[in-house]
Image (cartoon, helix red, strand yellow):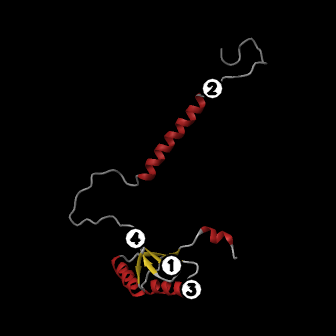
Amino acid sequence: MAGGAMGGDDDDLITDINVTPLVDVVLVLLIILMVTATAIVSKTLPVELPEASTSEAPPATPRTLGITIDDSGALFLDREPVSLEELEAQVSAARAEDEDVRAILAADGSVRHAKVVQIIDLLRRLEVTKFAINVRQTDLEGGSE
């Protein structure tokens, strides 16, 4: 019998675990998760969309240019070596193609500050205002040396 009606012997250990409430709670949590996940993913109602010859593709993610300055001061655009003039032409072409073009600037730590500022100035002159400077996380945590 369940509930300890075995003659009132309180010295015995309870060795049975009732998992029914645990299963009930897990199933309720699973149902809540499934309902909220579909609500988050699906922001529109499912409908049969008509076709149109003038439709536009959904907006693409903006192009990101990878600009690198190695320890000798050489420039690279998306891992391809370029001169300063070629970099300016390619960034200008990318900006003309996509107004929201972005750039990530990675410069070796031994590169002169003036070279990095020159590239930042070039980006700003070409109206590429969304750019980031790539650093290592440990450099930020280490402080000054």
Instruction: Give the labeled residue for mark 2.
Output: 18
Residue underneath mark 4: 62
- The residue most toward the left is 53
- Distance, label 3 to label 4, CA atoms, is 30 Å
Tag of residue 119: none
Q: Quadrant of residue 137?
A: bottom right
The nearer-to-camera label among 3 and 4 is: 3
Q: Which residue is mark 3?
A: 112
Quarter-of-image position of residue 1: top right
- Tell me whether the residue at label 3 lies in contact with that at label 4, contact meaning CB atoms closer than 8 angstroms: no
Residue 61 is situated, as x and y percent measured from the top left of the image, at: 39, 67
Query: Which residue is found at the position 24% from the left and 56% from the top?
Result: 50
Foreground: 105 or 20?
Answer: 105
Q: Residues within 10 Å of mark 1 (few under 14, many from 20)?
A: some
Q: Left or right of 9: which side holds 41? A: left
Label 1 sits on residue: 70
Residue at 30% in and 65% down: 57
Closest to the camera, between mark 2 and mark 1, is: 1
User: Where is residue 140 drawn, in percent x and y?
Assistant: 64, 71
Chain-order first, disc 3 or disc 4: 4
Callout 1 touching callout 3 (CB < 8 Å): no
Against 88, residue 48 (above or below) is above
Residue at image x 57%, y 72%? 135
* Gap in angstroms between the C-alphas marked 1 and 3: 11 Å
Cα distance between the residues tagged 2 and 3:
70 Å
